[in-house]
């Protein structure tokens, strides 16, 4: 995601980006796994049974992080889309496009877990309140972005068109939310309050925050890995990519390496 | 509490495990897909690299 | 009058009139789509009245999207779009003019037909008037926003569903406001607030959409 403050543009170069991500990935995955384990433990073995909701409230520990991620990722995508349009930095488009599938996944997860939480708690899998409806439309915004990106054969046009769409979407999202809220007040539709508010036990808060961090680390790890693959696909002929391949080949061929003349040379490591 | 009680979650078992289960499944699938794609990109790169190095 | 913008406006209108069957098809689609609601839901008068605003508005939504798909594709295909973009006229204004012509042929007929459809669905007097007025304010917004989607997807093969997918989230606020105005009237309350918001949306769309569409066209033709 948003990398160094110094030498910002250094990492807009694909080669540096790839190397940086390689270094970050182990930390990201490790943190994700530790926070997941801790969060789940606290969520299931420390947090008490809720007076009103029984055990079903425990779904909140993944529903709320999923919803947060779905919106946060879209915002970050929009920022990268803006950078793509204004400064035409290819790396920005790679990052935006890499974030989209993960954002869509979290959006779907938020909808799914929300439905399963809603059924035992409020009696309905789905209600057309502002939150859920906006979340559903957010899923369509993600899918639209991905579809547009994929539908345009010319890469430059695709990246810029999808970026414009993302920006229109990010402006539209609050408008959608408020219009559905407006619509709900007219029809007195069910408006369910998703958060438990200030009455949360500290263990519940801890579980939720830990799992939020876990989702965040996961999202960064997965989308950066996707970005690495995308970068390689786009830059197959580039020098940095060949050097990378060569470096990895050198690591693999421990005993034998061909010199530029094609004569085998024995290596002693 | 026993394992069976834990799994039942006071009757809310299907909802809770249905939520966590699907979420875990999605994340595992996505992670594997993304890592496989990166490996494939790297191996294609090797092929291109070796081809170009002669 | 030879002013370039006016010439463009006349040209677009002439093209529409020459291929009357395209415009007729849109209107035909609107009428059929609306008719599906009683057939698919229920012909009972009470139910018809309840679903009337939504049915008419949703049919109008889909008709607009359908019509927009062709908006820029033809001109892109034969090169006139690029020619037009070389013009010294402000691109935003050119887009506005083209969208105005487009609305005149594909949007205004829907507004004019809506009272008859309203009556078919059992709406009375003021409700019918509000329905027509909401469409009068709303269909231009749909066309203005739709221009963005049409510009982004111009010339793409098999992109029929894509434009719909892109535009429908954008259209939700307009749909909500338009139907709310009619529902409010039916509930004996004032539709003023909704219609005002709809008017505000129209003004905002007029200000923002044309140059966003122009930007999208630049992306498409670059």
Image (spheres, coloured by chain):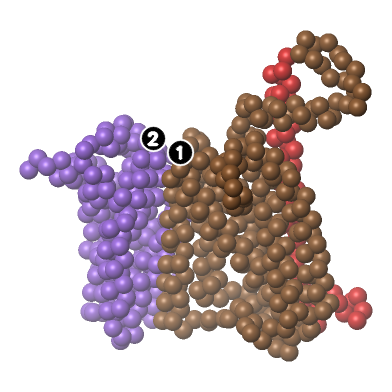
Chain colours: A brown, B red, C purple
User: Which quadrant is the C terminus of chain C positioned in?
Assistant: top left
Residue A74 shown left or right of residue C175 in the figure: right
Look at the numbered disc 2 and give the secondary structure of its residue: loop
Q: Point out residue A21 in the picture as x, y percentages from the top left corner.
A: 69, 45
Q: Is residue B33 visible?
A: no
What residue lies at 64% left-to-right and 57% top-to-bottom? A105
Q: Quadrant of residue C200?
A: bottom left
Mark count: 2
Return the residue nearer the eye: C55 or A69: A69
Return the residue nearer the eye: C33 or C14: C14
What residue lies at 69% left-to-right and 61% top-to-bottom? A215
* Residue pointed to by mark 1: A157
Q: Quadrant of residue A192?
A: bottom right
Q: Residue furthest left?
A: C1
* Residue pointed to by mark 2: C222
User: Badge 1 local density, few (<14 within 10 Å), some, or many (20+)?
Assistant: some
Residue A253 shown left or right of residue C175 in the figure: right
């Amino acid at each position: 995601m948003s990398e160094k403050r110094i030498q910002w543009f250094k990492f807009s170069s694909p080669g540096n980006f790839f190397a940086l991500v390689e270094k970050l990935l182990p930390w990201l995955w490790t943190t994700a796994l530790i926070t997941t384990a801790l969060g789940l433990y606290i969520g299931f073995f420390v947090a008490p049974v809720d007076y009103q909701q029984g055990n079903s409230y425990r779904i909140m520990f993944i529903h709320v992080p999923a919803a947060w991620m779905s919106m946060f990722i879209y915002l970050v995508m929009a920022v990268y889309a803006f950078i793509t349009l204004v400064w035409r930095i290819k790396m920005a488009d790679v990052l935006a496009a890499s974030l989209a599938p993960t954002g869509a996944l979290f959006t779907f997860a938020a909808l799914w877990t929300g439905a399963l939480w809603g059924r035992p708690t409020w009696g309905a899998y789905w209600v057309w309140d502002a939150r859920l409806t906006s979340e559903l439309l957010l899923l369509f915004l993600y899918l639209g972005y991905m579809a547009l990106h994929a539908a345009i054969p010319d890469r430059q046009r695709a990246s810029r068109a999808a970026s414009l769409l993302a920006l229109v979407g990010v402006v539209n999202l609050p408008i959608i939310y408020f219009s559905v809220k407006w619509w709900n007040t007219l029809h007195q539709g069910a408006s369910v309050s998703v958060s438990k508010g200030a009455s949360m036990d500290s263990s519940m808060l801890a579980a939720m925050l830990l799992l939020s961090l876990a989702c965040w680390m996961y999202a960064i790890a997965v989308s950066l890995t996707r970005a690495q693959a995308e970068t390689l696909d786009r830059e197959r002929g580039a020098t940095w990519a060949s050097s990378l391949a060569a470096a990895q080949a050198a690591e693999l061929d421990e005993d034998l390496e061909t010199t530029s003349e094609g004569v085998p040379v024995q290596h002693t490591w | 509490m026993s394992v069976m009680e834990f799994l039942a979650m006071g009757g809310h078992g299907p909802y809770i495990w249905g939520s966590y289960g699907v979420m875990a499944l999605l994340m595992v699938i996505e992670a594997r897909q993304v890592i496989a794609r990166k490996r494939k990109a790297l191996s294609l790169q090797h092929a291109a690299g070796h081809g170009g190095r002669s | 009058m030879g002013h370039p913008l006016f010439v463009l406006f006349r040209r677009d209108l002439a093209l529409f009139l020459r291929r009357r069957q395209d415009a007729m098809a849109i209107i035909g689609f609107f009428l059929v789509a609306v008719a599906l609601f009683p057939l698919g839901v229920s012909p009972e008068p009470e139910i018809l009245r309840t679903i009337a605003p939504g049915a008419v508005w949703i049919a109008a939504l889909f008709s607009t999207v359908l019509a927009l798909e062709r908006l820029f594709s033809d001109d892109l295909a034969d090169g006139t779009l690029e020619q037009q973009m070389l013009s010294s006229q402000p691109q935003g204004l050119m887009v506005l003019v083209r969208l105005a012509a487009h609305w005149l042929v594909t949007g205004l007929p829907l507004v004019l037909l809506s009272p008859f459809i309203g009556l078919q669905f059992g709406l009375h007097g003021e409700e019918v008037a509000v329905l027509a007025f909401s469409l009068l304010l709303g269909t231009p917004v749909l066309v203005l926003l739709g221009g963005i989607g049409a510009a982004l997807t111009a010339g793409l093969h098999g992109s029929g569903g894509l434009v719909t997918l892109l535009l429908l989230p954008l259209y939700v606020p307009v749909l909500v406001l338009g139907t709310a105005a009619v529902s409010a009237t039916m509930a004996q309350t004032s539709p003023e607030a909704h219609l005002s918001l709809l008017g505000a949306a129209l003004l905002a769309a007029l200000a923002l959409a044309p140059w966003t569409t122009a930007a999208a066209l630049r992306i498409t033709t670059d």
